[in-house]
Image (cartoon, helix red, strand yellow):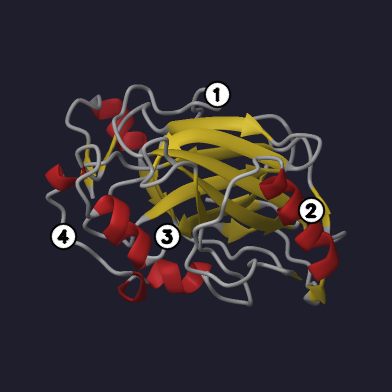
Amino acid sequence: MRVFSLIPVAIMCAMAAAHPVEESRSVLVPRDCSAEVTAFNLARREKRGLSKRTFYSELQNLTCVAAPETPREDYVATPAIRQDVTEGQVGVPLTLDIGVIDVTTCQPLPNVMVEVWSPNAQGSYGATFLRGAYTSSSSGIAEFQTIFPGHTSDSANHINLMVHTSSSMSGSVSHAGQVFFTDRWTDVIGGGIYYGYKQNANSRMMNAQDPNYQLANSAGYNAIVDIEEIGDDWPDGVIGYITVGVNPSRKVTF
Protein backbone atom coordinates (compact mmCIF):
# COMPACT_ATOMS: atom_id res chain seq x y z
CA MET A 1 0.00 0.00 0.00
CA ARG A 2 1.36 3.42 -0.97
CA VAL A 3 -0.16 6.36 0.89
CA PHE A 4 -0.50 9.52 -1.18
CA SER A 5 2.62 11.61 -0.51
CA LEU A 6 0.83 14.88 0.23
CA ILE A 7 -1.22 13.54 3.14
CA PRO A 8 -0.48 15.58 6.27
CA VAL A 9 1.27 13.69 9.04
CA ALA A 10 -1.69 14.07 11.38
CA ILE A 11 -4.02 12.48 8.88
CA MET A 12 -1.56 9.72 8.10
CA CYS A 13 -1.55 8.86 11.78
CA ALA A 14 -5.35 8.62 11.66
CA MET A 15 -5.13 6.03 8.85
CA ALA A 16 -5.37 3.09 11.20
CA ALA A 17 -5.65 -0.60 10.51
CA ALA A 18 -7.92 -1.97 13.19
CA HIS A 19 -9.58 -5.31 13.71
CA PRO A 20 -13.29 -4.94 14.45
CA VAL A 21 -14.58 -6.45 17.67
CA GLU A 22 -18.27 -7.11 18.27
CA GLU A 23 -19.61 -5.68 21.52
CA SER A 24 -22.64 -7.93 21.35
CA ARG A 25 -23.36 -11.02 19.32
CA SER A 26 -26.71 -12.54 18.47
CA VAL A 27 -26.70 -15.86 16.68
CA LEU A 28 -28.84 -15.86 13.56
CA VAL A 29 -29.59 -18.96 11.55
CA PRO A 30 -29.02 -18.35 7.81
CA ARG A 31 -32.34 -18.26 5.99
CA ASP A 32 -33.36 -18.57 2.37
CA CYS A 33 -34.29 -15.01 1.43
CA SER A 34 -33.92 -15.67 -2.27
CA ALA A 35 -37.35 -14.27 -3.17
CA GLU A 36 -36.83 -11.01 -1.28
CA VAL A 37 -33.21 -10.49 -2.29
CA THR A 38 -33.78 -11.46 -5.93
CA ALA A 39 -36.57 -8.87 -6.20
CA PHE A 40 -34.32 -6.32 -4.49
CA ASN A 41 -31.41 -6.99 -6.87
CA LEU A 42 -33.51 -7.08 -10.03
CA ALA A 43 -35.24 -3.81 -9.20
CA ARG A 44 -31.83 -2.14 -8.88
CA ARG A 45 -30.76 -3.39 -12.31
CA GLU A 46 -34.01 -2.79 -14.13
CA LYS A 47 -34.11 0.89 -13.23
CA ARG A 48 -30.94 1.39 -15.28
CA GLY A 49 -32.05 -0.53 -18.36
CA LEU A 50 -28.54 -1.70 -19.24
CA SER A 51 -27.23 -4.87 -20.82
CA LYS A 52 -25.29 -7.13 -18.49
CA ARG A 53 -21.65 -8.11 -18.81
CA THR A 54 -20.54 -10.32 -15.96
CA PHE A 55 -18.39 -13.29 -15.07
CA TYR A 56 -21.23 -14.77 -13.00
CA SER A 57 -24.15 -16.78 -14.36
CA GLU A 58 -26.55 -15.82 -11.58
CA LEU A 59 -27.20 -13.22 -8.90
CA GLN A 60 -25.15 -13.45 -5.74
CA ASN A 61 -26.00 -13.29 -2.00
CA LEU A 62 -29.49 -14.78 -1.97
CA THR A 63 -29.12 -16.21 1.55
CA CYS A 64 -29.78 -13.87 4.43
CA VAL A 65 -26.39 -13.92 6.19
CA ALA A 66 -24.40 -11.05 7.67
CA ALA A 67 -21.36 -9.91 5.73
CA PRO A 68 -18.22 -10.98 7.64
CA GLU A 69 -16.11 -8.32 9.33
CA THR A 70 -12.60 -7.62 8.03
CA PRO A 71 -9.84 -5.37 9.42
CA ARG A 72 -10.50 -1.66 8.95
CA GLU A 73 -7.48 -0.49 6.97
CA ASP A 74 -6.34 2.92 5.68
CA TYR A 75 -9.27 4.59 7.41
CA VAL A 76 -9.69 8.34 7.89
CA ALA A 77 -12.47 9.38 10.26
CA THR A 78 -15.36 11.73 9.41
CA PRO A 79 -15.23 11.77 5.60
CA ALA A 80 -17.30 14.26 3.63
CA ILE A 81 -21.02 13.51 3.27
CA ARG A 82 -21.24 13.07 -0.50
CA GLN A 83 -22.08 10.57 -3.20
CA ASP A 84 -19.44 11.69 -5.71
CA VAL A 85 -16.12 10.88 -4.06
CA THR A 86 -13.88 11.09 -7.14
CA GLU A 87 -12.46 14.53 -6.32
CA GLY A 88 -10.70 14.78 -9.69
CA GLN A 89 -9.09 11.33 -9.60
CA VAL A 90 -8.73 9.85 -13.06
CA GLY A 91 -9.89 6.28 -13.66
CA VAL A 92 -12.65 4.16 -15.14
CA PRO A 93 -15.83 5.67 -13.64
CA LEU A 94 -17.57 3.29 -11.24
CA THR A 95 -21.11 3.74 -9.96
CA LEU A 96 -21.07 1.66 -6.79
CA ASP A 97 -24.58 0.46 -5.90
CA ILE A 98 -24.55 -0.82 -2.31
CA GLY A 99 -27.74 -2.55 -1.21
CA VAL A 100 -28.02 -2.85 2.58
CA ILE A 101 -30.16 -5.75 3.85
CA ASP A 102 -31.30 -6.27 7.44
CA VAL A 103 -30.50 -9.94 8.07
CA THR A 104 -33.04 -10.11 10.91
CA THR A 105 -35.94 -9.29 8.57
CA CYS A 106 -34.63 -9.97 5.01
CA GLN A 107 -35.75 -6.43 4.14
CA PRO A 108 -33.77 -3.45 2.78
CA LEU A 109 -32.35 -1.25 5.54
CA PRO A 110 -33.08 2.46 4.93
CA ASN A 111 -31.55 5.58 6.44
CA VAL A 112 -28.24 4.18 7.70
CA MET A 113 -24.91 5.88 7.06
CA VAL A 114 -22.57 4.03 4.71
CA GLU A 115 -18.89 4.98 4.33
CA VAL A 116 -16.60 3.97 1.44
CA TRP A 117 -12.90 4.53 0.72
CA SER A 118 -10.46 3.14 -1.84
CA PRO A 119 -7.11 3.82 -3.58
CA ASN A 120 -6.72 5.70 -6.85
CA ALA A 121 -5.68 4.21 -10.19
CA GLN A 122 -2.03 4.19 -9.10
CA GLY A 123 -2.90 2.24 -5.96
CA SER A 124 -2.44 5.14 -3.51
CA TYR A 125 -4.78 6.26 -0.72
CA GLY A 126 -5.37 9.96 -0.15
CA ALA A 127 -6.51 12.15 2.70
CA THR A 128 -9.85 13.06 1.12
CA PHE A 129 -10.12 11.72 -2.42
CA LEU A 130 -12.14 8.56 -3.03
CA ARG A 131 -13.58 8.80 0.48
CA GLY A 132 -17.14 9.66 1.41
CA ALA A 133 -20.30 8.74 3.28
CA TYR A 134 -24.00 8.83 2.48
CA THR A 135 -27.21 7.46 3.94
CA SER A 136 -29.07 4.56 2.37
CA SER A 137 -32.28 5.51 0.59
CA SER A 138 -35.81 4.46 1.51
CA SER A 139 -35.15 1.35 -0.60
CA GLY A 140 -31.91 0.52 1.23
CA ILE A 141 -29.52 1.73 -1.49
CA ALA A 142 -26.38 3.79 -0.93
CA GLU A 143 -24.95 4.85 -4.28
CA PHE A 144 -21.52 6.38 -4.85
CA GLN A 145 -19.69 7.78 -7.86
CA THR A 146 -16.08 6.66 -7.66
CA ILE A 147 -13.50 4.97 -9.91
CA PHE A 148 -12.50 1.37 -10.38
CA PRO A 149 -9.66 1.16 -7.85
CA GLY A 150 -6.03 0.50 -8.61
CA HIS A 151 -4.49 -2.39 -6.72
CA THR A 152 -2.22 -1.89 -3.72
CA SER A 153 0.79 -4.12 -3.03
CA ASP A 154 -0.47 -5.60 0.22
CA SER A 155 -4.00 -6.73 -0.67
CA ALA A 156 -6.22 -7.94 -3.48
CA ASN A 157 -8.11 -5.24 -5.34
CA HIS A 158 -10.99 -4.02 -3.16
CA ILE A 159 -13.10 -1.16 -1.81
CA ASN A 160 -13.51 -0.63 1.92
CA LEU A 161 -16.93 0.06 3.41
CA MET A 162 -18.54 0.60 6.79
CA VAL A 163 -22.21 0.63 7.79
CA HIS A 164 -23.50 2.56 10.80
CA THR A 165 -26.58 1.70 12.84
CA SER A 166 -28.25 5.07 12.13
CA SER A 167 -28.11 8.01 9.71
CA SER A 168 -25.51 9.74 11.90
CA MET A 169 -21.79 9.54 11.27
CA SER A 170 -21.35 9.36 15.03
CA GLY A 171 -23.70 6.40 15.30
CA SER A 172 -22.46 2.96 16.22
CA VAL A 173 -20.99 0.72 13.51
CA SER A 174 -22.78 -2.50 12.62
CA HIS A 175 -20.39 -3.65 9.88
CA ALA A 176 -16.86 -2.94 8.66
CA GLY A 177 -15.69 -4.88 5.64
CA GLN A 178 -14.15 -5.04 2.20
CA VAL A 179 -15.70 -5.87 -1.16
CA PHE A 180 -13.60 -7.26 -3.97
CA PHE A 181 -13.45 -7.61 -7.74
CA THR A 182 -12.74 -10.77 -9.70
CA ASP A 183 -9.11 -11.07 -10.74
CA ARG A 184 -10.37 -11.02 -14.32
CA TRP A 185 -11.99 -7.59 -13.95
CA THR A 186 -8.81 -6.19 -12.44
CA ASP A 187 -6.91 -7.69 -15.39
CA VAL A 188 -9.28 -6.16 -17.93
CA ILE A 189 -9.64 -2.68 -16.43
CA GLY A 190 -6.80 -2.22 -13.97
CA GLY A 191 -4.30 -4.01 -16.18
CA GLY A 192 -5.39 -2.38 -19.43
CA ILE A 193 -4.64 0.92 -21.12
CA TYR A 194 -7.38 2.80 -19.29
CA TYR A 195 -6.90 6.10 -17.45
CA GLY A 196 -3.45 5.80 -15.93
CA TYR A 197 -3.64 2.31 -14.41
CA LYS A 198 -0.45 1.50 -16.30
CA GLN A 199 1.37 3.88 -13.94
CA ASN A 200 0.53 1.62 -10.98
CA ALA A 201 3.91 0.25 -9.89
CA ASN A 202 2.58 -1.88 -7.02
CA SER A 203 3.11 -5.61 -7.08
CA ARG A 204 -0.14 -7.48 -7.69
CA MET A 205 -1.81 -9.71 -5.08
CA MET A 206 -4.43 -12.08 -6.43
CA ASN A 207 -7.66 -12.78 -4.56
CA ALA A 208 -6.60 -16.27 -3.46
CA GLN A 209 -3.47 -14.82 -1.84
CA ASP A 210 -5.29 -12.30 0.36
CA PRO A 211 -6.46 -13.54 3.78
CA ASN A 212 -8.97 -10.67 3.95
CA TYR A 213 -10.53 -11.93 0.73
CA GLN A 214 -10.91 -15.36 2.29
CA LEU A 215 -12.42 -13.84 5.43
CA ALA A 216 -14.82 -11.58 3.51
CA ASN A 217 -16.02 -14.52 1.42
CA SER A 218 -16.82 -16.83 4.32
CA ALA A 219 -19.93 -17.94 6.23
CA GLY A 220 -21.95 -18.23 3.02
CA TYR A 221 -21.39 -14.60 1.95
CA ASN A 222 -20.10 -13.46 -1.46
CA ALA A 223 -18.04 -10.24 -1.26
CA ILE A 224 -17.47 -9.90 -5.02
CA VAL A 225 -18.80 -6.76 -6.70
CA ASP A 226 -20.92 -7.70 -9.72
CA ILE A 227 -20.02 -5.48 -12.68
CA GLU A 228 -22.36 -4.20 -15.40
CA GLU A 229 -21.13 -2.13 -18.33
CA ILE A 230 -22.58 1.29 -19.17
CA GLY A 231 -21.19 1.43 -22.70
CA ASP A 232 -19.12 -0.78 -25.00
CA ASP A 233 -15.51 -1.08 -23.78
CA TRP A 234 -16.40 1.09 -20.77
CA PRO A 235 -15.94 4.62 -22.18
CA ASP A 236 -18.71 5.74 -19.81
CA GLY A 237 -17.62 3.49 -16.96
CA VAL A 238 -19.19 0.55 -15.17
CA ILE A 239 -21.76 -0.10 -12.47
CA GLY A 240 -20.89 -2.35 -9.55
CA TYR A 241 -23.55 -4.05 -7.42
CA ILE A 242 -22.99 -5.48 -3.98
CA THR A 243 -25.57 -6.50 -1.38
CA VAL A 244 -24.37 -6.21 2.22
CA GLY A 245 -26.19 -8.08 4.95
CA VAL A 246 -26.02 -6.44 8.38
CA ASN A 247 -27.55 -7.01 11.79
CA PRO A 248 -28.53 -3.47 12.90
CA SER A 249 -28.51 -4.49 16.56
CA ARG A 250 -24.88 -5.54 16.39
CA LYS A 251 -22.21 -3.02 17.43
CA VAL A 252 -18.62 -3.23 16.23
CA THR A 253 -15.74 -1.42 17.97
CA PHE A 254 -12.12 -0.95 16.90
Compared with 200, 11 (above or below) is above
Depth check: 25 or 181 in front? 181
3 or 2: tag closer to the N-terminus: 3
> Going by the picture, which residue comes out furthest to the right?
105
Q: Secondary structure at mark 2?
A: loop
Compared with 249, 75 (above or below) is above
- The kind of residue on which mark 1 rests is Arg
- The residue depicted at 56 percent of the width and 23 percent of the height is 81
Tell me how far mark 1 sits from mark 2, CA to CA. Answer: 26 Å
Compared with 96, 52 (above or below) is below
Q: Which residue is mark 4?
A: 203
Tell me how far mark 3 sits from mark 2, CA to CA. Answer: 29 Å
Tell me how far mark 3 sits from mark 4, CA to CA. Answer: 17 Å
Q: How many marks?
A: 4
Q: Nearer the viewer, mark 1 or mark 2?
A: 1
1 or 3: tag closer to the N-terminus: 1
Q: Which residue is mark 2?
A: 249
Q: Secondary structure at mark 1?
A: loop
1 or 2: tag closer to the N-terminus: 1
Q: Secondary structure at mark 3?
A: loop
Q: Position of residue 2 (x, y in %)?
A: 20, 45
The quarter holding residue 135 reads top right
Q: Position of residue 106 (x, y in %)?
A: 83, 60
